[in-house]
């Protein structure tokens, strides 16, 4: 099997590290060679967080280079735009449409770019964008955006649904399993 390259991008506190843990658990259980690498840029202060997940028969490096990402899972739309150069030809961005202002916008030194997703679509980028936050809230927790997005990713990967559910049970505390299963299902079944 060829190596599949994923990037999980967001801001600190959105749960991207749990999402990468879930993916790592799932993929190892499926028998893949998996490499995961995390980059934390001021994540404690709402800064950018990037996780690389690569899997296949044999993976030698954990980093996804320019133009190599099969999927970018973006927890916030500006973060998806920031890393679009890593997307390969024919790749897909799965994007939460939530807007989280970065610090320069918060302090008034910059403006949040208007119509980010529209400009990416105009360039021919394949984007599956939706309001993952509202689905997470429907599941019972605004913190479940990460699992909603994993549910959406599951639609594009050839891994059985039941294996994802097992990985959720292994990756979250027992008291949060049901909320996360519901969040996963809402992302998975979204039209």
Image: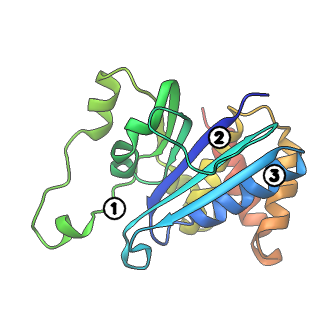
Q: Position of residue 82 (x, y in %)?
A: 34, 47
Label of residue 26 in the image: 3
Q: Position of residue 33 (x, y in %)?
A: 81, 46
Quadrant in the rendering for residue 84: top left
Q: Residue at x 73, y 28 (%)?
A: 2
Q: On the rendered structure, is 121 left or right of 68? A: left
Q: On the rendered structure, is 23 left or right of 113? A: right
Q: Residue at x 75, y 72 (%)?
A: 176
User: Mark 3 near mark 1, Cβ–Cβ under 8 Å?
Assistant: no
Q: Which quarter of the figure is the C terminus placed in? A: top right
Up-down: is 141 above or below 161?
below
Q: Nearer the viewer, residue 39 or 102?
A: 39
The residue beneath circle 1 is 100
Up-down: is 183 above or below 71?
below
Q: Residue at x 45, y 58 (%)?
A: 10
User: Mark 2 near mark 3, Cβ–Cβ under 8 Å?
Assistant: no
Up-down: is 175 above or below 88?
below
Per the image, label 2 sits on a secondary structure element best described as: helix
Q: Position of residue 185 (x, y in %)?
A: 72, 47
Q: Nearer the viewer, residue 79 or 160?
A: 79
Crowd tier of the residue under label 1, counting other residues whose Cα lies within 10 Å: few below 14, some 14–19, many 20 or above: some
Q: Report how far apart the C-alphas of labels 1 and 2 lie in the structure.
A: 22 Å
Q: Earlier in the sequence, mark 3 or mark 1?
A: 3
Q: Earlier in the sequence, mark 1 or mark 2?
A: 1
Per the image, label 3 sits on a secondary structure element best described as: helix
Q: Residue at x 78, y 66 (%)?
A: 171
Q: Nearer the viewer, residue 95 or 87?
A: 87
The residue beneath circle 2 is 153
């Amino acid at each position: 099997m060829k190596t599949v390259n994923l990037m999980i991008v967001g801001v600190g506190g959105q749960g991207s590290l749990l999402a990468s843990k879930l993916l790592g658990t799932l993929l190892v259980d499926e028998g893949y060679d998996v490499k995961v690498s995390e980059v934390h840029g001021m994540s404690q202060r709402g800064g950018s967080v990037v996780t690389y997940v690569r899997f296949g028969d044999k993976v030698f490096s954990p980093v996804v280079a320019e133009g190599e990402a099969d999927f970018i899972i973006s927890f916030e739309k500006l973060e998806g735009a920031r890393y679009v150069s890593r997307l390969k030809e024919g790749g897909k961005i799965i994007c939460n449409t939530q807007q989280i202002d970065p610090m320069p916008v918060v302090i008034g030194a910059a403006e949040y770019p208007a119509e980010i997703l529209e400009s990416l679509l105009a360039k021919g980028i394949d984007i599956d964008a939706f309001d993952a936050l509202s689905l997470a809230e429907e599941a019972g927790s605004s913190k479940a955006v990460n699992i909603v997005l994993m549910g959406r990713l599951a639609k594009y990967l050839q891994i059985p649904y039941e294996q994802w559910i097992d990985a959720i049970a292994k990756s979250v505390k027992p008291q949060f399993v049901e909320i996360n299963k519901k969040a996963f299902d809402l992302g998975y079944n979204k039209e």
